[in-house]
Image: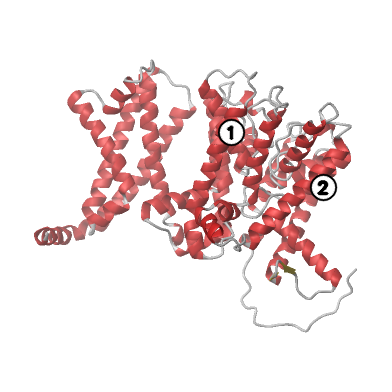
């Protein structure tokens, strides 16, 4: 061991002078390699292919893999701590070993290992599946590169709110470009820029408003892109970057932890450190369970082409429901002829929507293994205050909305249903109208009073730290308590033996004012761009977009281009949050260590 250390020290001294130059060259080569790999994947995925093209792509993939292997070897050679380097990059070298075995079997036996394994499955299209497998391996390597970038977030001297905004802009732009590729649409021409931008924004911001039919306009590839945008947008692309970075480097920096703490409303940096993995793990588990339940509850009369298509439909709708997106690959959504009457299936959707709208920190508080264990051992231990607010306010709003919807619509849109079916439909509409946008009744046929009820519920929206929009249930609860305390003449706002800080109340009032002002302004502009549409429909559409709900009276596709851009902006601002944008654009005051004389102003 001593000899090895002395030899390593000797080598390190010899290569030290060239280390910086070589590693800088490797960094530049890595960027070019990533661009080449990404371009190849986009070309292969987005454009029609013939047999000869597939073989050429396989050759280029092997060429790229060779450079990845060389890149890793050089970085390993120049590291001063090889054991630590191997531990830190375990995922990367594990994949590269598979690539090395593939190359050796190809050169020596002329029978690549992966190709031979695929051949044993009896597939007719071996070249296609072999290329798909190699592309998947390349995608993992690109995700590892993304993880490396994630570890550098601490070096960016920008606000977390600004980084959060940029992450969604990048996601929306990427989705727009991909949906414009020929293979994404049934017509083979790709979606237009406005169609792509609208769809990408709606999916990334988990809204669900559409200008084209997702089921018939987009191919399987296009729908897959939409599903990925929903997943990344729902959990936040920065969360995924942090997630991969935590595997790659064993941790991320203080600024990164602070950003996650702010986004997930975590109570401490230490809490934020373990929160992310649990959130993603729980989310994927809930989506998996949801997909299994939906799979078992599809109407037997629905004819799927294969069991794989049935699985795909189940997974897509589970992800869409949990992330509160409201996208469906049925032409009429849940109003599809053979889905509309599946009331038990509607309850499964409502359950997924409810869990997704609770907020990730609340989900962990309720379903986290350690938290459940502690509550079993200590029965007096309660949920956190934020979880209690999310739960009680959500249940109260669901009951309030369901009861009103039942009495307003029992002789109208649900008059042809049995009493129990009317109850389920009322509950479902109350759940979905606050955040998701799935509907089992024709929204255009609802009473004006019901539309106003929906506008109120959509404006409140989901809970903090969730995939849903709106001003959030916590904001509404604090505003209600503040008004109630003022009426009673109380100095402090109290809840469950806790005093609510004035900073939180000020934030809640700011969110209310910013949100109401934006919605009013956007609705005013829509009345100018869509003069022939009723103002109630325009307000409903705007609130639905801003609150990232996705319900519509059917006017979305018929909006003018200017109107569609207003809705796109509303979806983006609603997902990011007006307060986040205000913080990102504002400048901090230089000091707060002063106070002017108290003023007395007439109010009311």
Residue linked to disc 2:
524
Q: Is residue 358 rendered to the left or right of residue 442?
A: left
Seen in the image, is 129 located left or right of residue 552?
left
Q: Nearer the viewer, residue 574 or 27?
A: 574
Q: Position of residue 194 (x, y in %)?
A: 65, 35
Relative depth, front residue between 433 and 488: 488
> Which quarter shows the C terminus?
bottom right
Q: Position of residue 524 (x, y in %)?
A: 82, 47
Query: Residue 206: image x %, image y %?
Result: 63, 42
Residue 109 shown left or right of residue 365 in the figure: left
> Disc 1 designates what residue?
293
In the foreground, 374 or 71: 374
Q: CA distance from mark 2 to mark 1?
A: 43 Å
Closer to us: 65 or 246: 246
Q: Is residue 285 above or below residue 180?
A: below
Give the secondary structure at mark 2.
helix
The local crowd at label 1, few if under 14, some if 14 to 19, many if 20 or more residues have their Cα within 10 Å, is some
Q: Against 496, is 523 above or below?
A: above
Q: Residues within 10 Å of mark 2 (few under 14, many from 20)?
A: some
């Amino acid at each position: 061991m001593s000899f090895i250390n002395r030899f390593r020290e000797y080598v390190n001294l010899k290569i030290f002078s060239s280390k910086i130059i070589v590693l800088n060259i490797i960094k530049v080569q890595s960027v070019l390699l990533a661009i080449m790999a990404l371009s190849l994947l986009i070309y292969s995925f987005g454009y029609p292919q013939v047999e000869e093209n597939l073989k050429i792509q396989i050759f280029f993939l092997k060429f790229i893999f060779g450079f990845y292997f060389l890149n890793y070897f050089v970085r390993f050679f120049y590291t001063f701590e090889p054991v630590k380097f191997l531990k830190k990059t375990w995922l990367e070298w594990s994949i590269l070993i598979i690539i090395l075995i593939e190359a050796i079997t190809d050169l020596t036996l002329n029978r690549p290992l992966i190709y031979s394994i695929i051949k044993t499955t009896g597939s007719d299209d071996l070249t296609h599946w072999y290329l798909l497998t190699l592309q998947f391996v390349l995608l993992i390597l690109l995700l590892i590169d993304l993880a490396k970038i994630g570890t550098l977030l601490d070096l960016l001297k920008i606000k977390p709110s600004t980084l959060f905004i940029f992450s969604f802009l990048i996601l929306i732009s990427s989705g727009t470009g991909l949906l414009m590729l020929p293979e994404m649409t049934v017509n083979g021409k790709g979606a237009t820029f406005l169609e792509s931008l609208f769809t990408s924004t709606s999916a990334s911001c988990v809204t669900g408003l559409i200008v084209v039919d997702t089921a018939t306009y987009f191919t399987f590839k296009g729908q897959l892109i939409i599903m990925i945008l929903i997943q990344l947008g729902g959990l936040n692309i920065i969360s995924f970057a942090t997630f991969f970075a935590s595997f790659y480097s064993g941790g991320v920096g203080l600024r990164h932890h602070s950003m996650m703490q702010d986004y997930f409303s975590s109570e401490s940096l230490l809490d934020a450190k373990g929160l992310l993995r649990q959130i993603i793990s729980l989310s994927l588990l809930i989506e998996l369970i949801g997909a299994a339940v939906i799979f078992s509850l599809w109407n037997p009369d629905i004819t799927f082409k294969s069991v794989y298509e049935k699985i795909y439909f189940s997974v897509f709708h589970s992800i869409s429901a949990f992330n509160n997106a409201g996208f469906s690959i049925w032409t009429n959504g849940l109003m599809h002829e053979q889905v509309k009457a599946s009331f038990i299936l509607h309850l499964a959707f409502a359950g997924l929507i409810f869990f997704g709208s609770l907020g990730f920190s609340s989900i962990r508080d309720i379903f986290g293994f350690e938290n459940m264990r502690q509550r079993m051992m200590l029965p007096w231990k309660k949920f956190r205050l934020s979880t209690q607010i999310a739960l009680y306010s959500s249940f109260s709003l669901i009951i309030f909305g369901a009861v009103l919807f039942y009495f307003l619509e029992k002789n109208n849109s649900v008059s042809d249903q049995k009493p129990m079916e009317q109850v389920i439909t009322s509950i479902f509409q109350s759940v979905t109208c606050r955040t998701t946008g799935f509907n089992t009744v024709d929204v255009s046929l609802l009473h004006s009073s019901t539309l106003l009820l929906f506008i109120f519920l959509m404006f409140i929206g989901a809970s903090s730290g969730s995939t849903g929009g709106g001003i959030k249930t916590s904001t509404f609860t604090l505003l209600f308590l503040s008004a109630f305390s003022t009426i009673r003449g109380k100095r402090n706002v109290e809840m469950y033996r806790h005093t609510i800080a004035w900073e939180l109340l000020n934030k809640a009032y700011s969110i209310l004012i910013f949100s109401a002002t934006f919605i009013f302004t956007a609705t005013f502009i829509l009345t100018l761009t869509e003069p022939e549409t009723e103002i109630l429909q325009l307000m409903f559409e705007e609130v639905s977009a801003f609150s990232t709900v996705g319900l519509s009276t059917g006017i979305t596709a018929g909006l003018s281009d200017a109107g569609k851009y207003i809705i796109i902006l509303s979806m983006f601002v609603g997902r990011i949050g007006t307060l986040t944008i205000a913080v990102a654009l504002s400048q901090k005051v230089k000091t707060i260590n002063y106070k002017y004389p108290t003023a007395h102003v007439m109010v009311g």
